[in-house]
Amino acid sequence: MTRRILLIISGGIAAYKALELIRELKRRGIASRCILTEAAKQFVTPMSVAALSGEKVYDDLFSLTDETEMGHIELSRSADLVVVAPATANIMAKAAHGLCDDMASTALLATDKPVLMAPAMNVRMWEHAATQANLATLKGRGVHFVGPDEGDMACGEFGPGRLAEPVVIAGAIEALLPA
Ligand SMILES: Cc1cc2nc3c(=O)[nH]c(=O)nc-3n(C[C@H](O)[C@H](O)[C@H](O)COP(=O)(O)O)c2cc1C
């Protein structure tokens, strides 16, 4: 049976690296069904994600067609693992507090599957007490994390907050999936 993840792409500058992640997973025989947040669509197009994953892309919680074909609850459980890459400060905060006002955050709250997050954000956002508290809350609930890495950032600053390399995220995913 094909191993499958639900990949939530949230709206950070590193969202384009999710495309490389989808390809890397495909090489390893892992299929990705994807959800894009509204902000993610500013950084990658649903068309690129659909073309690379070879699957329909989900973004609208209130889509009549999607809800009749595969409802948000079913979608949240249609994979062996839920992966958020990149994970914004916003989606971490929403998940930590149980907010669910779009398809991505609702799927995260509705899932009964393990969750892996790959955070990516500006170093100040990452080091902010609010983000660190949300990280601790999520870890305390058993959410897995990969990265962030330390290095030069797209915004010109340096520090922790870079998205882990797609190949490293793929390794973390494989380690969490059933063999
Ligand atoms: C150019 C640009 C780059 C951004 N990069 C990031 C980022 O890397 N990480 C992050 O947490 N937020 C980033 N943001 C802010 C998010 O897009 C914003 O918080 C948004 O509400 C996130 O929504 P989402 O979590 O639903 O995708 C960026 C915003 C802009 C305009």
Image: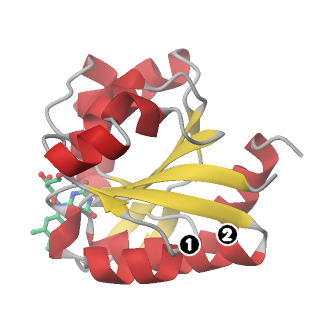
Give how far apart the Cα atoms at labels 1 and 2 are.
Answer: 5 Å
Residue, x 46% and y 71% (percent of image)? Answer: 18
Q: Nearer the viewer, residue 35 or 42?
A: 35
Instruction: Determine the secondary structure under disc 2.
Output: helix
Q: Nearer the viewer, residue 84 or 1?
A: 1
Depicted 122 relative to depicted 139: above or below: below
Depicted 160 relative to depicted 97: above or below: below
Residue 92 position in % (x across, y down): 32, 37
Callout 2 crowding tier (Cα within 10 Å): few <14, some 14–19, many ≥20: many
Residue, x 20% and y 24% (percent of image)? Answer: 99
Q: Is residue 6 left or right of residue 47?
A: right
Name the kind of residue labelled 2 in the image.
Leu
Q: Nearer the viewer, residue 112 or 175?
A: 112
Q: Which mark is residue 25?
A: 2
Callout 1 crowding tier (Cα within 10 Å): few <14, some 14–19, many ≥20: many
Name the kind of residue labelled 1 in the image.
Ile
Residue, x 52% and y 32% (percent of image)? Answer: 77
Instruction: Determine the secondary structure under disc 1.
Output: helix
Pointer 1: what residue? Answer: 22
Are discs 1 and 2 less than 8 Å apart at CB? Answer: yes
Q: Which mark is residue 133?
A: none
Residue 127 position in % (x across, y down): 32, 44
Q: Is residue 70 left or right of residue 151?
A: left
Residue 167 position in % (x across, y down): 68, 72
Rendering quarter of residue 24: bottom right
